[in-house]
Amino acid sequence: MSNEDDNAALPAALARYKGRSNPAAVAATLSRSGCARHCPLTDFYETYSGPFGSKFIAYTFFDLLDQADNVVTQTMELRSTFGTPERYLVLSDMCGLAVLVYDCGTDAVFNMDLEGSEQKLIAGTLRPTWPSLRAFLEFFFLGVGA
């Protein structure tokens, strides 16, 4: 797929999720959750509302603030259980004792198991599965980079 095709394909795949009813709440919610600076996740959640499903990975990608299970509630649960730093946000449901985690500082996304990888994440030694939110979104919605 060419870069031009990538730029058109991702918005097309996300079209059914477009239309957040409260985009102004996104930046404030992310800031309270530990993403103090503007990041690509801010732009994503200001535009799209989930939860999101994928044909390429078994996780459900949570909405930031809508639904009972969301990024905020699952992030708070991970922090209280494992002591993960504020820069990390849980993006997904648990699947096989693993979750998807976003790093607000680097824009990386991790497929983190809860059987030791959480300690590597805390120590800063866990390698990201996707180098950026964009790369993760392309895989999640388009299967690119699989």
Image (cartoon, rainbow, N blue to C red):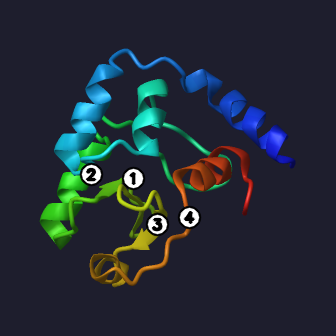
Q: Disc 2 or 4, which lies upstream in sequence?
A: 2
Q: Which of the image's four quarters has the C terminus?
A: bottom right
Outermost residue to the front: 37
* Label tally: 4
- The reply to whether callout 2 and callout 1 are in contact (CB within 8 Å) is yes
Q: Amino acid at mark 1?
A: Asp
Residue 19, visible in the rendered structure: yes
Instruction: Report, in whole angstroms, how far the alpha carbon at label 2 lies from the one at label 4.
Output: 22 Å
| Residue at mark 4 | 131
Q: Is residue 73 above or below residue 119?
A: above
Quick check: 75 left or right of 51?
left
Instruction: Report, in whole angstroms, how far the alpha carbon at label 2 lies from the one at label 1.
Output: 8 Å
For residue 74, the mark is 2
Query: Badge 3, how many Cα within 10 Å: few under 14, some, many 20+?
Result: many
Q: Amino acid at mark 4?
A: Pro
Q: Nearer the viewer, residue 87 or 100?
A: 87
Query: Badge 4, how many Cα within 10 Å: few under 14, some, many 20+?
Result: some
Q: Amino acid at mark 2?
A: Gln
| Residue at mark 1 | 93
Q: Disc 1 or 4, which lies upstream in sequence?
A: 1
Query: Badge 1, how many Cα within 10 Å: few under 14, some, many 20+?
Result: some
Instruction: Report, in whole angstroms, how far the alpha carbon at label 3 lies from the one at label 4.
Output: 9 Å
For residue 110, the mark is 3
